[in-house]
Amino acid sequence: MSISIFACKKEGNAPAIENISPSTEKIAVGQYIVLKSAIAGEAAQLTYKWTSSDGLQSANKEPGWIPKKAGYQTISLEIAQGNKSTTKNAVFNVLEPDFRLGLWGNTRAEIQLYESKAGRKLLNTDPAVLIYGGDEGNAFDGYVTADNILINAATLYSVDYSSNPSLYVRDYSLQLQKLQSKYGDPKENRVYYKNQTVKDELDANPGLVGSAILAGDVQFKATWEKQGNSINLMLYKNTDSNAIVFGISYAPLSTGVASVKNEYRSVVLERLHRSLLLL
């Protein structure tokens, strides 16, 4: 956490503000953060005035702050005791979330707090996977934890196009375009064929690609590595469950999150898929 504390401005003999601290070491846009202060000397009958560079205004002793934008944000606290007052500023580096409102390493309780304060309802009771409704009507977002720590995440699209499987290809292409708009060209963008015969047949008859997905003969995958994260868009048939898995997995590129090894990207989607079946 990057913090810069500026010198106090004191009028009279007001109590000194020793420091301003947030409730978490790392802060991301959209997270609910409680701000606290340490006051030196006699602290009776104080009034508080909190403001921030992104719009916070509060008279609470320990206000809640939900950062609105990434970058360095200034928090200002003025305390008054009668006609005496003191002001102190602190600067915090606000990060972009790794997934939804979460940062890798956040605890399960922190994720639930952030989502609750954003007005979102937890959909399941699995202790290792927290599922929320996604931004699109057929999407579900899952935070995956290990030892109570967020280690990876996924968005799963719950659709059944078995009667018109070409729609899988349509939806995959739409999601690919959205991710390209956000992250640029993928590091990898491939179609995997069961064998050369399947490839030759689909090259000659591209309208059969949807049916080939249903049969498990073809898989789609695109990968980005951005901002320390691996983002993977995938569409394939799980041969164990015979279910079509379509979604996006997210994981840190490093393995330094609580020393927990990241799960393979397709496993994350399948884990979320299993949890959805229990809803």
Image (tube, rainbow, N blue to C red):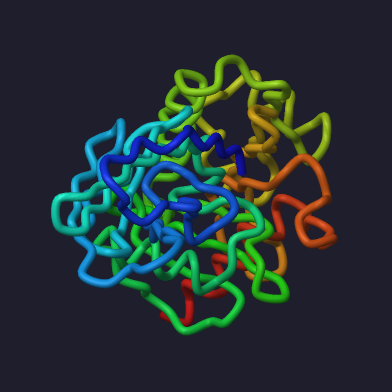
Left or right of residue 119: residue 186: right
Identify the residue at image location x=55%, y=71%. 108
From the viewer's side, name the closer residue of 131 and 44. 44
> Quadrant of the rendered structure where residue 131 is?
bottom left
Quadrant in which the N terminus appears: top right
Quadrant in which the C terminus appears: bottom left
Query: Is 79 rendered above or below residue 224?
Result: below
Residue 33 percent coordinates (x, y): 40, 57
From the viewer's side, name the closer residue of 184 and 17. 17
From the viewer's side, name the closer residue of 120 and 267. 120
Q: Residue furthest left?
A: 83
Identify the residue at image location x=23%, y=56%. 48
From the viewer's side, name the closer residue of 256 and 74. 74
Identify the residue at image location x=54%, y=62%. 143
Residue 213 percent coordinates (x, y): 59, 45
Q: Residue furthest front?
A: 12
Tally of numbered discs: 0
Residue 149 percent coordinates (x, y): 66, 67
Q: Residue furthest top?
A: 185
Query: Is 188 rendered above or below residue 57?
Result: above
Identify the residue at image location x=40%, y=68%. 113
Residue 156 percent coordinates (x, y): 49, 54
